[in-house]
Amino acid sequence: MFPMTVHRAVGVDIGGTDTKIGLVRFEGDSDSLRCAKFEIETRLKIPTVADRGPEAVVDDIAAAVASLKPPPIMGIGVGCPGPLSPSRGVVFGSPNLAGWRDVPLRDLIAERTHQPTVIDNDANLAALGEYCASPDSPGDLVLMTLGTGIGTGTIIDGRVFHGQFENASEWGHTIVQPGGLPCPCGQCGCLEQYASATAVVGRYTQLARDSDDSSVRPTVTAADVARLAASGDKVAGEVWDDACRFLATVCVNIQHAVNPGRVLLGGGMSAAGAFLLSRVVRHFDALRWRVHDDFPVIGLSRLGNDAGIVGAARLAVSGADH
Amino acid sequence: MFPMTVHRAVGVDIGGTDTKIGLVRFEGDSDSLRCAKFEIETRLKIPTVADRGPEAVVDDIAAAVASLKPPPIMGIGVGCPGPLSPSRGVVFGSPNLAGWRDVPLRDLIAERTHQPTVIDNDANLAALGEYCASPDSPGDLVLMTLGTGIGTGTIIDGRVFHGQFENASEWGHTIVQPGGLPCPCGQCGCLEQYASATAVVGRYTQLARDSDDSSVRPTVTAADVARLAASGDKVAGEVWDDACRFLATVCVNIQHAVNPGRVLLGGGMSAAGAFLLSRVVRHFDALRWRVHDDFPVIGLSRLGNDAGIVGAARLAVSGADH
């Protein structure tokens, strides 16, 4: 038995549009990344004005953290689009943070806030948040965040898996269709081009434009496409099913590469809930091997948009994970 | 500075046809899986008569170990085709070991030899052997053994990576061609169906049969196909190049999933040496992303057929790796 202790930390989740900031209270064994209980006590959302430069963004974050008037905290954890180096605290640059190049984000935030600060990839910390949120199923997990792109994070033995170059778990850029659609990353056939919310909307919109069927209408979100598919729209049904089949294909590949207990689906597309999950599971069951029953449970994210700040705060409590 | 110590162990590499057994001497820091120096002092090869049952195979192995007349050893490490459980010491069964089902291989060998025994997947231990063989480049690595099938092993932080269900690193059964060729595992489009030695020979033989070009001749090994390709045979060139492109595709996926420092190519197909490596590297350079320079070095196995016994003996020295 471990004594139950209380820790607080601030979690920051920097996105291309908004930055989410939360004061998170953890109650549990401080030695373990699993937590019996946590609560977001206060939260804020501020715009990310990336093109004003990293210093201005850091100023905004520091002001927001101060406005939370936090009680004593263990520190600040920051999730940011990568590629980045958690060990050096440097963000190399990201298409979503225009003009950022080799930004020493960790030290900038630590200097402005006078708090111990750690940073990691946003999808990694969302995965860590999900891990905290299911203390009853503590095994390894991979989280896929299906949004503008596809971010993924992998938790092995309770820790974020980074890999030798600190950029592991980029399943959104694994090639699922050799010679397939070009991706801004420079590859062709990346999962992201077939199963992100952007890809689903883009493909449906294109088919709608090409279609003679006047019932096909342009849509705005992947959830719209899911709704149309659920209501019997044939084009939407095909687009949605294709995306789910590619996701299931990558679930098979995750099974064989990482062999985790769970693969969780989050991000904008997961707003479709069971209509996403049941399709992915159905395709997975059809695609998977028959040799051994080492299958992950495929499920939906529990924390949704909160996963990033919970994981970031958890990292601050446990200290840099490397 | 650590004192240099000498350890000996027996490594056993059970294959579908032959079982290789070696007495291996390690000199180095016993706390680390890296070794400054090792030497296979004695080696034996005996037939694997799997259909006589596991007990008979274990008897043969025990007799062979005894015949080595080993000096004091730390124990016996055994690599075996999976799926299996290293932690429970049980082989669930394998297409290459007809009739084996839930065999408690570890305990059977320990009982017959009176030696501490550990078991692991054969490809995992070959990867561990390769890791031992390059103390100068100690980072994470993935080994792909291109033979009858494609076995792969992953070393992370100096240890075999097993995953939650102990069956991680089966890259040969990741799907590289959705809806592609059926695999005996029950999936379609597995890498193994496109880039194993068997696949290369099979595809060339089929094209040779279909071809009107009388210069196309059936071949026996993947190295033959490589030789024909190198000498300008068009059909062989196409078959070889396709296999190399699929391997490069999976190297990209390994990069994004595991982010290792090295991917090594071994097994029968690696007999083609630079003709394999240069093609795979060329395709990798064409396929890889432009966002970040987190690329593994792709290289050839150093130990070839010895990797399995070296890794198995190393596991016996370090103790079960879980």
Image (spheres, coloured by chain):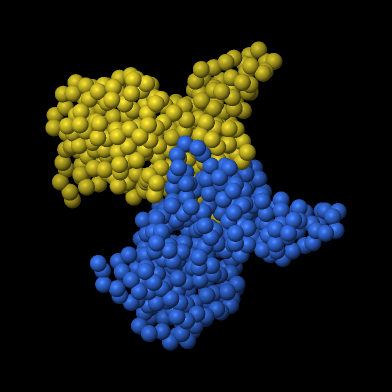
Chain colours: A yellow, B blue
Q: Quadrant of residue A170?
A: top left
Residue B70 is situated, as x and y percent measured from the top left of the image, at: 41, 84
Position above or below: B99 against A75: below
Q: Quadrant of the N terminus of chain B?
A: bottom left
Residue at coordinates 45% horizontally, 74% vertically from top-left?
Answer: B11
Residue at coordinates 37% horizontally, 69% vertically from top-left?
Answer: B36
Residue B316 is situated, as x and y percent measured from the top left of the image, at: 38, 71
Q: Please name whichever residue, A205 or B129, is drawn nearer the observer in this view of the structure.
A: B129
Residue A198, visible in the rendered structure: yes
Q: Please name whichever residue, A283 or B233, is drawn nearer the observer in this view of the structure.
A: B233
Residue at coordinates 63% horizontally, 21% vertically from top-left?
Answer: A207
Residue A104 is situated, as x and y percent measured from the top left of the image, at: 30, 34
Residue A157 is situated, as x and y percent measured from the top left of the image, at: 34, 50
Position above or below: A220 against A54: above
Residue A81, visible in the rendered structure: no
Position above or below: A142 against A224: below
Q: Please name whichever residue, A285 or B231, is drawn nearer the observer in this view of the structure.
A: B231
Horizontal relation, residue B295 to residue A119: left or right: right
Residue at coordinates 51% horizontally, 39% vertically from top-left?
Answer: B289
Q: Quadrant of the C terminus of chain B?
A: bottom left
Q: Quadrant of residue A125?
A: top left
For this orientation, the residue located farthest to the top is: A214
Position above or below: B25 against B81: below
Total number of numbered discs in the rendering = 0
Horizontal relation, residue B66 to residue A249: left or right: left
